[in-house]
Amino acid sequence: MVKGHFSDQLIWRQPLLGEVSRVPAELRDWLLDSGSLTQRLQQASDGQLSVEVLSQSVQLPRFSERRALGLAPRRVALIREVLLFGRGVPWVYARSVIPMQTLTGRLRKLRHLDNRPLGALLFSDPTMSREALEWACIPADKSSSLNSNLPPYNQPIWGRRSVFKLSDKPLLVCEMFLPGFKPDEQAIK
């Protein structure tokens, strides 16, 4: 476990009506939408959505990830970290945690996504189910803990995560909206 990583510092919670007002208005709909983020980003970017893989390796998930997935302490998973770019601007940092027992049978293909978005595969699978969304906020002074490949940001970073199941096999997807995520402003330009 990487000490001090954002996912172990955050309190992930299901959105409650009274607390939703804390979320910036321009992000509320994005954070609470249970549909395909990939599809929405494709539309918002006028089809100019791309994926950059920051890392992909087998490692121990962090405590909060293990808890969300119900994994035993020493169970490893395939952890994939990517940036989703809209119109060339980094919009979303995503971290997927796929337990090794999920990567069997027909789901072995999840090991070889390359620069394809995971969301497109998830939402096209007829066996897909999704558990409740949780959200959290990284304070500006902690944003450098998001990923060592990203610069520190001077504003809070809001994100969401949920456990998906494909053929009853779980995986966790966390999506953090970066400060450059301003699809409405960029569409006007």
Image (tube, rainbow, N blue to C red):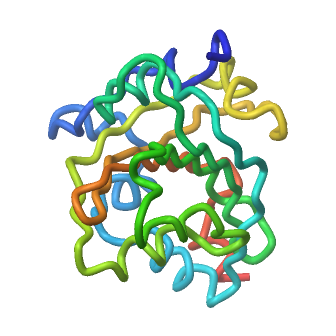
Which residue occupies 50% across, 18% down?
Answer: 8
Q: Is residue 147 left or right of residue 120?
A: right
Q: Is residue 50 left or right of residue 46?
A: right
Q: Front-most of 172 and 149?
A: 172
Q: Report x, y in % for residue 167.
A: 25, 65
Quarter of the image for residue 180 reads bottom right
Quarter of the image for residue 41 reads bottom right
Quarter of the image for residue 68 reads top left
Which residue occupies 50% across, 43% down?
Answer: 97
Q: Report x, y in % for residue 54.
A: 78, 50
Q: Report x, y in % for residue 10.
A: 46, 21
Quarter of the picture containing the C terminus is bottom right
Which residue occupies 17% across, 33% down?
Answer: 18
Identity of the residue furthest to the left in this view: 17
Establish if 29 lies above or below 42: above
Establish if 115 lies above or below 70: below
Q: Report x, y in % for residue 20.
A: 27, 40
Q: Front-most of 66 and 3?
A: 66
